[in-house]
Amino acid sequence: MSAGRPPATPPRPRFWIVLLVNLGLGIPGVVPVFMAWYLLVNWPLAALGLTREEVPGSDSVLPGPAELLPLVLAAVAVWFVVNLLLLRRLGLARTWWWIAAALLPLLPYLALQLFL
């Protein structure tokens, strides 16, 4: 060990924090993701003939965007603020941070779709 260098410390597991926080945000995020998927399946994708429309008891999907927009905006705002604060605090590479932060919250929804 040289006299000018401090002793090497093992790296802190910072990426685990990103993983756990964004998976945790994905659990309540299942609701807006499901609502967005339901609206997409029953409106534009059904109009293109890619899916079958299954709107029970109503001929209109107009209330869907009015209910979905505030919920999705609130979920995205919370996700963005939490990740921005963690990014500033932990100082990881921004590119990998935002890629991981964008994909990890979708895992709880995908797990529910695959296993239920």
Image: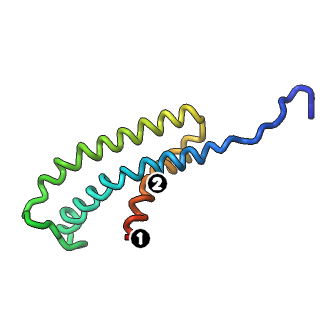
Is 76 positioned to the left or the right of 20 in the image? left
Residues at marks 2 and 1 touching, judged by CB atoms closer than 8 Å: no
Residue 34 appears at what percent x and percent y?
30, 58
Local SS, label 1: helix
The amino acid type of the residue labelled 2 equals: Leu
The amino acid type of the residue labelled 1 equals: Phe
Relative vertical location of residue 58 with respect to residue 93 in this rendering, above or below: below
Residue at position x 38%, y 39% in the image: 78
Relative vertical location of residue 96 with respect to residue 110 in this rendering, above or below: above
Quadrant housing residue 13: top right
Is 14 positioned to the left or the right of 67 in the image? right
Residue at position x 21%, y 62% in the image: 44
For marks 2 and 1, the one nearer the N-term is 2
Residue at position x 51%, y 50% in the image: 100
Relative vertical location of residue 5 with respect to residue 17 in this rendering, above or below: above
Is 62 positioned to the left or the right of 97 in the image? left
Residue 98 appears at what percent x and percent y?
50, 45
Residue 103: give its label: 2
Quadrant housing residue 53: bottom left
Residue 115: give its label: 1
Residue 54 appears at what percent x and percent y?
17, 70
Structural crowding at the residue carrying mark 1, measured as other residues with C-alpha within 10 Å and reported as few (<14), some (14–19) or many (≥20): few
Local SS, label 2: helix
